[in-house]
Amino acid sequence: MAAVVDGTMMAGPPPSVGLDKSRSGRTTEVVVIGAGPAGCLAAIAAANAGAQVTLLERADFPREKVCGCCIAPRGLSVLADMALSHVLDGAPRLGEVRLESERASVRIDRDSGVALSRGAFDTRLVGAAADRGVDILHGTLATVGADGVVRVHRAGTELTLHPAACVVADGLSGRSLDAHPGVSWRVSRTSRIGLGAILPPGSIRIGRGEVLMRVERGGYVGAVELEDGRIDVAAAIDHEVLRRETPCAAMMNRLGSAVRDVAAVESARWTGTPWLTRQRSTLAMPGILVAGDAAGYVEPFTGEGMSWALASGCAAGQLAARMIHEPSCWLQWPAHWEGLLRRDRWRCRLVAHLLRSPRTVHAGLTVARRWPTIAARLARTIGQPHHPDSPRFRAIT
Ligand SMILES: Cc1cc2nc3c(=O)[nH]c(=O)nc-3n(C[C@H](O)[C@H](O)[C@H](O)COP(=O)(O)OP(=O)(O)OC[C@H]3O[C@@H](n4cnc5c(N)ncnc54)[C@H](O)[C@@H]3O)c2cc1C
């Protein structure tokens, strides 16, 4: 099925790339909304399957976002399977986790993958999508209506697209499905809020290749050194805390003695997120698949969100390409998404819940100090690739 485009010109200059026809002259068959890890992998997977793909992104890249920037082994294995490991060039390998609470601290040997700034990671993924023939439009706000039509707003121009398949990967704060009836968010009432910033090199006491996690009352904060020596800091904080404390004070209080340069923390531009733990009421509709954070998210303690986004984006892209010839196969998406992520999300939710109790945290750290091998073994089970024979890993056929 070919895409139909009926563009209505509004004020302002026309888009630099026509949406009706790609640079190759073919019509757009798959539209992907959002160029984060989920959207980029969806676009690449659909292009690999032979579809003509257009990727629409609201922001101009490179852009940073609130994220711990640790890409777990499962994410690395998805990238390797897609021949995309080169996007990680120069990213420091993470081999140790330093867990701290108010009263205790423990170091655990754990392969946590690599650290890469989102500015670099997402821009490199977009570059890889372009290399595979995907048309990319930045500075483009997209919405999907009840009629399944994609509306594209760019540089004062509004256009409509009727692709055979649309993958919505617009993240936690994405609103492209707002006009779609029956699609809503279920947000957990005990959910926390994300906060983050990138600090200058040396401003936090942390070694290269080390992940620092500090669990305090009212939230936890993680820090890691990035590819260029800057320090990424990201936290999940109770919204009650943020009523009493400024974002900067909340971070300072939770980073505690890890702060080496107070002025750097005070002058950082702290950015927030909406409430974190949430689930979409619907993951698929005729012509539409929802992937990545846009489908649902759990608090980030185990640092797996990007891996889930890469895995679900990749699977959604494969299915979107199939929808060009088999429109009804969108029906498979909710069950496939569950199979890919349910167990990991459940475990992550359990960990986040246990961390709410300072007593449990203290007991956990004490046990980890006494039996470091057991702690390391347990920690290693998080964020690992799925075994290729696992039914959860199977490609959609
Ligand atoms: C505090 C915190 C720490 C975290 N730490 C980690 C970690 O260490 N490791 C990890 O793996 N994960 C971590 N995560 C989770 C990770 O950031 C997300 O899971 C991941 O970014 C999801 O990718 P995505 O592609 O689904 O969405 P996003 O990365 O959010 O991308 C969505 C894209 O869609 C675009 N967009 C939105 N609306 C529109 C629209 N209408 N039209 C066009 N474009 C649109 C946005 O500009 C954005 O570029 C953390 C999250 C938080 C909040």
Image: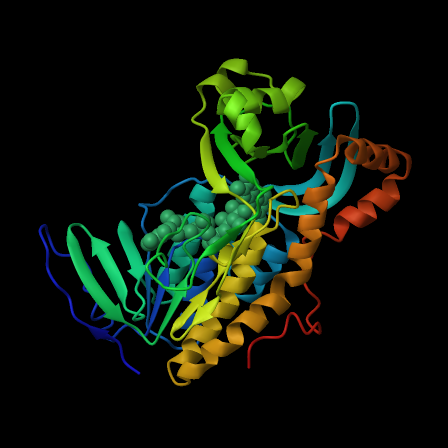
Q: Does residue 346 appear to the left or right of 289 in the view shown?
A: right
Outermost residue, bottom direction? 325
Residue closer to the observer: 392 or 48: 392
**Residue 303 location, x and y as percent?**
62, 46
Task: Identify the residue at image location x=73%, y=33%.
Answer: 99
Q: Quadrant of residue 183?
A: bottom left
Q: Quadrant of residue 321?
A: bottom left
**Residue 206 location, x and y as percent?**
64, 27
Up-down relation of residue 88 to residue 397 (above or below): above
Q: Is residue 89 visible?
A: no
Q: Quadrant of residue 371?
A: top right
Task: Identify the residue at image location x=67%, y=50%.
Answer: 348
Up-down relation of residue 365 to residue 82 (above or below): above
Q: Does residue 259 appear to the left or right of 387 in the view shown?
A: left
Q: Does residue 185 appear to the left or right of 5 in the view shown?
A: right
Task: Identify the residue at image location x=49%, y=21%.
Answer: 246
Task: Identify the residue at image location x=53%, y=63%.
Answer: 312
- Color theme of the render: rainbow
**Residue 141 location, x and y as percent?**
28, 53
Quadrant placement of the C terminus = bottom right
Q: Is residue 260 visible?
A: yes
**Residue 380 location, x and y as percent?**
76, 50
Up-down relation of residue 72 to residue 219 (above or below): below
Residue closer to the observer: 247 or 239: 239
